[in-house]
Amino acid sequence: MGASRSSGTTDELGPDEDSGGGPPGRSADPGPRADDGGIPGEPPGSELLAALLDGMDAALCAFDAAGTVTHWNREAERVLGWTAREAVGRTGFAGWAVRRADADEVRARLMSAMDAPGRQVHEFALLRKDGGRVLVRTQSAGVRGADGQPAGVYCAFSEVHAQIDLERAIALSEALLEDASWGVALVDVDLRPTVVNAYAARALGGGRTALLGRPLGELVVQGVEELEAALHHVLAEGAPSAPAELWVTLRTAEGERRRCWRSGFLRLASPLTEEPVPLGVGWLFRDVTAAKLAEQEADRLRFRTSQLHRAARTASECEDPMEAATSLLDFALAGFADHVLVDLVAGERLVRTAATPFDAPGPCLPVSGGDIPARYGPGHPALRSVERTGTVRTSAGAGDAERSWASERRWPRDAAHALCAVLRSRGRTLGVLTFLRAASRSAFERPDAAYAETVAARVAGAVDLAQVTRGAGR
């Protein structure tokens, strides 16, 4: 408040410096003085103050104790159109920056800050140089002199709509990082979380502070490469045009769990630099696992229903009932399993009647040369299925060698998951169907068992018809 106005933007406060014959409020000696802190060869203190004030984002003006304008920066000029040369030295805003009818009230409210503690916030309608009116929000506070007495007032102001926009932006960011119903995480350029909201912390399986600064690879077991690639792309190229769905496997205290996150990304750049400097990425996501699983299940059900419909139409055109049975199995295998075996009951044992090739994908065909005994040991899943008259699911354990596990059960060497469904018709057990999957596929689940039982019921009808027809032929 005590710098000289050598740049045309700032001015001296106090009556003692206004006696040099110059215009009111201007110093007669604009040169540097000892108390300016000036150093030979360096800008005087007034010029430094002018540069600081002109570089502010907020409009700023100041008044001495008599209400004379002493400072006026470039942002104030931008908002109201009055230059510093036109503003400095005027008494109050009356007649130029505010209507005369409002001048006394505005002056009283502004100057009251000189004797009040802290800052005061007001809203005024000020006049632009072109005659237009603009609503501004001001923050004013008193200035004390060296003797501790009131020496003036400084006032920072901005257009109300700009202030409201800023407040909305701050409120939005705080709401997103606190109470949003989707995950929000701010990730720095090293791809480490710096801020996460409560939803994101729950989704990532940790506390809001415990997750900060940790590499994503410590939180995501599978899918981290895709996530990091998306973040790198945003940093380099900008935000994608549409949300992305990322499948990840998380490491939690309860074990690993697979989740699907529908994610949107925003590149964060500093607003304080002329060239955009990336600060990181804003990552917004929702857990859509349940919806995606339901969608996948609906797609799977539609496909399987379509396959059963096509199988039924094909089987109805087969003259040989066993050919109808194997045709049904060819349609059922699509997208469901890699191999299928048909073992029928013959006395006290099971005999292999039809199967897909053991060494390569292929259709289900009757065993060449006629039925052969299935040399299953006690406790074999197929035998258990017959004994229980139900479905049995099994998979190779973590410690089992895949090939030995399959060969011990007389199955193809690549088998790692099995589902055995009993063949029942007219209240009799006719045999068992065994569906097999390789290790690269997931284990059979409950919906798979229901589908296999539906297929087994249709195959059992065809097998029963084949046996009746063969008996009648004899």
Image (cartoon, rainbow, N blue to C red):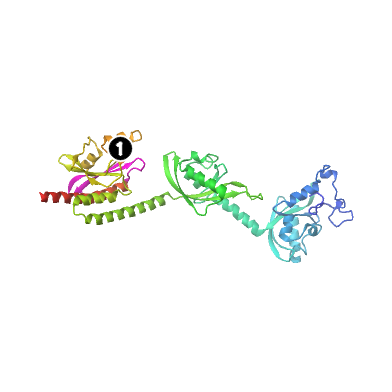
Question: Is 30 positioned to the left or the right of 400 in the image?
Answer: right
Query: Is residue 438 located in the magenta-colored stretch of the structure?
Result: yes
Q: Assign the magenta stretch its main secondary structure.
A: strand
In the image, the segment drawn in magenta is: 418-445
- Residue 114 at what x, y percent from top left? 76, 53
Relative side of 66 to 326, left or right: right
Single out the residue that lies furthest toward the front: 369
> Is residue 429 among what the camera can see?
yes
Task: From the image, tell me which residue sits under label 1.
Answer: 413
Number of labelled discs? 1
Q: Residue 447 at what x, y percent from top left?
A: 32, 48
Disc 1 packing (10 Å; few <14; some 14–19; many ≥20): some
Residue drawn at (62%, 54%) of the image: 167
Spot occupied by residue 383 in the image (x, y as percentages of width and height)? 22, 39
Above or below, 324 against 225 in this view is below
**x, y percent for residue 431:** 20, 44
The kind of secondary structure element at disc 1 is loop
**Front in this rendered view, residue 441 or 82:** 441
Which sits in the foreground, 59 or 354? 354
Between 59 and 218, the residue placed more toward the observer is 218
Judged left or right of residue 334, residue 114 is right
Q: Say whether residue 225 is magenta.
A: no
Res. 197 visible in picture = no
Could you tell whether 26 is left or right of 326 in the image? right
Residue type (three-letter) at the residue carrying disc 1: Arg
- Residue drawn 75% across and 66% down? 101
